[in-house]
Amino acid sequence: MAFITLRQANVVASPGGVVKGSPLTNSEVDNNFANINLVIGFREDLETNQTDNLVAAVNEINADVGNVSLLTTTTTSNLVAAVNEVVSTVGVVDANVGSLAALTTTATNNTVAAINEVDASVNTVDSNVGSISALTTTATNNTVAAINEVNAAAASIIPFAIALG
């Protein structure tokens, strides 16, 4: 642990500080600076754009991180915990939505594109089948029921047609 040699006792002391009670020698002043550098590190070792002073470097990091109190996650005091919360939520969404790779549409990398593809296919089927409301059978809400009704009617007429020759 680094320590600082102080000249007088009425100065704010740091843990491990030594009060000398007399003026410091050049060597003691040099040692104090060296010990401060050991405790807080060297500016040239900063990996921020701001390397002129520690306050500017910390402010740069703070600006990059942003105001964590504005997070809309449950956790707003810790950026890593908030990101982990989002990641776990995405995992739940993925589990509920399913894997894009399992899509049988030609669009397999985008859920919206796959849905639009299916919707276009349904519209094509609807236009080829026709409007269910235009059915003249008594079954007007189900295509299969309407076909079965026509089939049953045809089955009852066919024996008469055969008998009539």
Image (cartoon, rainbow, N blue to C red):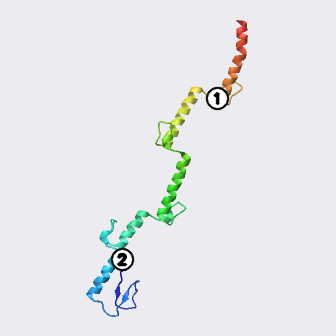
Does residue 69 sit above or below 97 in this rendering?
below
Tell me the number on the disc at residue 17. Answer: none
What secondary structure is found at the residue carrying circle 1? helix
Judge the density around disc 2: few (<14), some (14-19), many (≥20) Cα neighbours within 10 Å: few
Q: Nearer the viewer, residue 158 or 19?
A: 19
Relative depth, front residue between 151 and 16: 16
Q: How many marks?
A: 2
Question: Which residue type does callout 2 highlight?
Answer: Val
Locate residue 62: give its quadrant: bottom left
Say which amino acid is labelled 1: Ile
Give the residue at mark 1: 132
Query: Which residue is located at x 47 percent, y 62 percent?
Result: 80
Residue at 58 percent of width and 30 percent of height: 126
* Residue at image coords 30%, 83%: 31
Q: Which of disc 2 and disc 1 is earlier in sequence?
A: 2
Residue 41 in the image: state x and y as whole percent. Answer: 34, 73
Residue furthest to the bottom in view is 22
Q: CA distance from mark 1 to mark 2?
A: 80 Å
Which numbered mark, 1 or 2, is in the foreground of this view? 2
Q: Is residue 131 left or right of residue 117?
A: right
